[in-house]
Amino acid sequence: MKFWQKLGEIDRRIIYTIILLAVVIPILLKITMPIRISDTVKNAYNSLDRLPAGSIVMISIDYDASSEPELQPMLIAVLRHCFKKDIKIIMLGHWALGLPLGEIALNKVATEYNKVYGEDYVNLGYRPGYSALIVGLGREIRDFFSTDYRGVPIDSFPFMRRVRNYNQISLLVGLEAGATGDAWVQFAGARFGQKMFLGATGVSAPDLYPYLQAGQITGLIAGLQGAAEYETLIKESGTGTLGMPTQSVVHGLIIIFIILGNLSYFVLRKKKQ
Amino acid sequence: MIWNIIGTWIAAGLTLAIFSFLYKDNPFYKFAEHLYVGVSAGFGVIYVWAFDLKPMLVDRFVAEQGIERWILLIPAILGILMFSRWIGKIGYLSRLPISFTVGIGAGLGITASIQGFLLPQIQATLLPLTTINNILLVVGVITTILYFYFSREFKGKSSYLLKLGIVFIMVSFGASFGYTVMARISLLIGRIFFLLSDWLHLI
């Protein structure tokens, strides 16, 4: 009786300490584990991989620092995939505080592949009012982004001169921590037929599965697991791959906690009856 | 280089200050929390000016000619009217830009919901019942909708349809909760990874 009571009333700080150790130890030991590729991520990868060199991909940074650990590995993996295939990138963002994260990743990966700003990629920056903006981009991109985020006219960049609207964008990649993904699908996808796949935080991903099932998006990269899968597909290990063993250990631990908590609850309830 | 080191130490210190809340509420946590809110607000103001007001309004007003130029006065005046809320007598004027925004939002939202969500989702549910997945999907959609049908009470055998609807809803909640756990742990992994690699250089 006392054992089950103590188990049910265990101090939350002990649980936090155990979780902390379960996160730190696998990272320090650099444990690796095989990563199974899901169809949703494979489809996302394929839709980008099939594009010919010189195609234009638009990447939307719709997250900020609070979702960085999940979405930044996805962004880096997608950027590497694009630059490997000589695909041009237009980056923009609907979250003001996410723009520096996009810029950091873009500069890092562009340097790895010797890509030049203005020739291989541009960063348009942020504009508020995402619904109207997404609809407006379907008409003329210059109505909203006549300059890039540095204030340089976009027509001074060679590949941007041929970009007018979604017709010139081969694929859209939305990295989502909120509801902007819905707007991309419902405006750019449904109204203009823009082909796209989304990457989303674990919290947002379940809401996006209906779009996947209906074929409104070509693929879905969900959470850190999705990022790890994409990194595996492009054969470039990153923080997604490194985080997965830890993720598995902690998930196992949480399942054990849930079972023990429930056992304690039911045993005590039975004793009381 | 030195600024990177200073930045890393500040980030590490603030991360630990936020984590200290797990033990109990304390001044370090409060400091980090308020700093985050303040910096975010400041950042937001700068971004609205640099990426919205200046390029879309000020620069365009200087660059455009003729009617295109004067049309820009309409959003500028509507924007200024929002501030009238703080002036009692003319506070009602703020309703103009608000109604404008609500009208645009409703117009965009209604078309998006029907064209971009409702119709494609209904279309994607009209499936041949030839595979287990298709059967599960169709039964799940119908029983879940029935659960939210409040115009008629379901009694007797028909109540089993509602119970089946609840099962599907619970499975959906379970999946969302599982993903949420994964997301939260991912955030913790990200921070711990930062502390161990960028700050302490242990990995």
Image: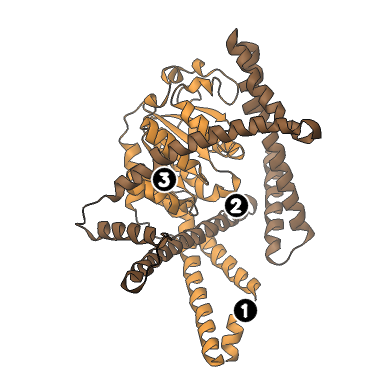
Image point (72%, 44%), residue name: B6
Question: Label 1: chain?
Answer: A
Using the image as rendered, state which of residue A67 and residue A53 is in the foreground: A67
The residues bearing labels 1 and 2 have C-alpha atoms spaced at a distance of 30 Å
Chain B image colour: brown
Q: Which residue is mark 1?
A: A10
What x and y, as percent, mark residue B150? 43, 61
On the question of residue B2 being in view, the answer is no
Q: Residue furthest left?
A: B130
Using the image as rendered, state which of residue B95 and residue A93 is in the foreground: B95
Question: Where's the C terminus of chain A, which quadrant?
Answer: bottom right
Q: Residue furthest top?
A: B66
Chain A image colour: orange
Question: Label 3: chain?
Answer: A
Q: Amino acid at mark 1?
A: Ile
Q: Which residue is mark 2?
A: B194
What x and y, as percent, mark residue A271? 54, 92
Q: Are marks 2 and 3 on the same chain?
A: no
Using the image as rendered, state which of residue B134 and residue A4 is in the foreground: B134
The residues bearing labels 2 and 3 have C-alpha atoms spaced at a distance of 19 Å
Examine the rendered structure and indicate whether residue A25 appears above or below residue B28: below
Question: Where's the N terminus of chain A, which quadrant?
Answer: bottom right
